[in-house]
Structure formats: C-alpha cells, structure tokens
C-alpha cells in the first residue's frame, strides 16, 4: 500500500502541484483564485504521497442547482497510484452527487488529452459533444456527463 494521505483541498495546493503535461491547461489562470473558487463550490480533496508530494487535486463544483462539474488536476505521480485514485474518485463522485443533490455531473476534457477521455469514460461518463475552441489554448474539448441514477 502506498503512503497516500487524502486531505481537504486548500487553494494553495493548485500552486504547489506539479501538473502532468496534459493538465497544464490551468497554467494561464490565477491558480490561487481558481482554487478558492473551486473550494467554495463543492467538495474537493488533495491526495498526497508522503514522500513525493501532491498526487492530485479534484472535486465536484456545483455550477447550478442539481448540476455539478467534476474537475481533476494530477501530477505525474498519479500513474503510480492509478487503481487507488480511480476507486477513490468514483466513490467521491457518488458522495458529491448525494451531498449536493445532483441529478447531473459533467466534465470537460481537451480533445488532445487521450488518457483523460479513457479515464472519464471508465467513471461512467458519456460524451455529449464538442466544445469548439473551448480550451484556454484555443483547442477543442469534449463535454461528458454522468447521470447518477444511470451509474451507481
């Protein structure tokens, strides 16, 4: 078992994480402000490897009544703990849906983020469409949704 600790997300974790290349999508944002905003909108967490640092930050942000948006920023350490984090994120989605009374959770993945598409589908999300030029770099993204009653 790896030395993993799950803690309550703090806005400075967005600054402290060393994101994977594919997760550098947030680099042009004010990371601390983004972290404050995400923390205010719903449950979120940070996973730490006690020896290596932050593995990932994630959560579900309520965007309107009944609808949340799942988010995750991961470091390269997440691949060393894939199964653990997959199971943890799946459980957190179920918990967030109950706590926030959500009938829909959505997630946005950049088209070029191949691993992200496989992973979000494995969590029970279904692709809905293309968001043209949606990403900060002007690239296209895919919007996915998960309806909690469809996937337990």
Image (spheres, rainbow, N blue to C red):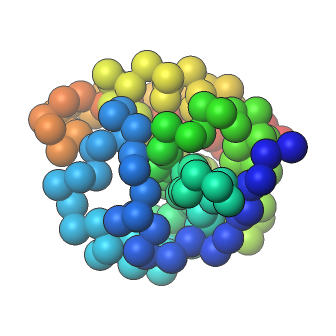
Quadrant of the image for the N terminus? top right
Residue under the image location 77 percent in, 53 percent down: 3
Residue 27's place in the image compared with 34, above or below, is above
Residue under the image location 22 percent in, 40 percent down: 135
Residue 4's place in the image compared with 36, above or below, is above
Q: Position of residue 125 (x, y in %)?
A: 61, 33
Viewed as shown, does residue 152 lie left or right of 111? Answer: right
- Quarter of the image for residue 36 reads bottom left
Quadrant of the image for the C terminus? top right
Whether residue 77 appears in this view of the structure is yes
- Quarter of the image for residue 81 reads top right
Residue under the image location 71 percent in, 63 percent down: 6
Whether residue 150 appears in this view of the structure is no
Between residues 54 and 43, which one lies in front from this camera angle? 54
Viewed as shown, does residue 112 lie left or right of 91? Answer: left
Q: Position of residue 33 (x, y in %)?
A: 29, 75
Q: Residue furthest front?
A: 51
Residue under the image location 22 percent in, 39 percent down: 134
Q: Position of residue 40 (x, y in %)?
A: 48, 80
Residue 47's place in the image compared with 145, above or below, is below
Q: How many marks?
A: 0
């Amino acid at each position: 078992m790896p030395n993993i600790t799950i803690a309550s997300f703090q806005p400075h974790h967005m600054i402290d994480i060393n994101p994977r290349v594919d997760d550098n999508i947030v680099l042009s944002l004010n990371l601390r402000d983004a972290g404050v905003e995400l923390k205010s909108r719903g449950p979120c967490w940070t996973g730490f490897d006690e020896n290596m640092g932050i593995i990932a930050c994630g959560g579900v942000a309520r965007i309107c009544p009944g609808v949340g948006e799942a988010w995750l920023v991961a470091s390269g350490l997440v691949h060393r703990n894939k199964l653990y984090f997959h199971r943890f994120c799946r459980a957190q989605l179920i918990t967030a849906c109950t706590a926030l009374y959500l009938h829909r959770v959505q997630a946005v993945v950049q088209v070029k983020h191949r691993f992200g598409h496989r992973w979000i589908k494995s969590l029970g999300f279904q692709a809905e469409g293309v968001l043209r030029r949606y990403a900060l770099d002007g690239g296209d993204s895919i919007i996915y949704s998960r309806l909690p009653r469809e996937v337990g």
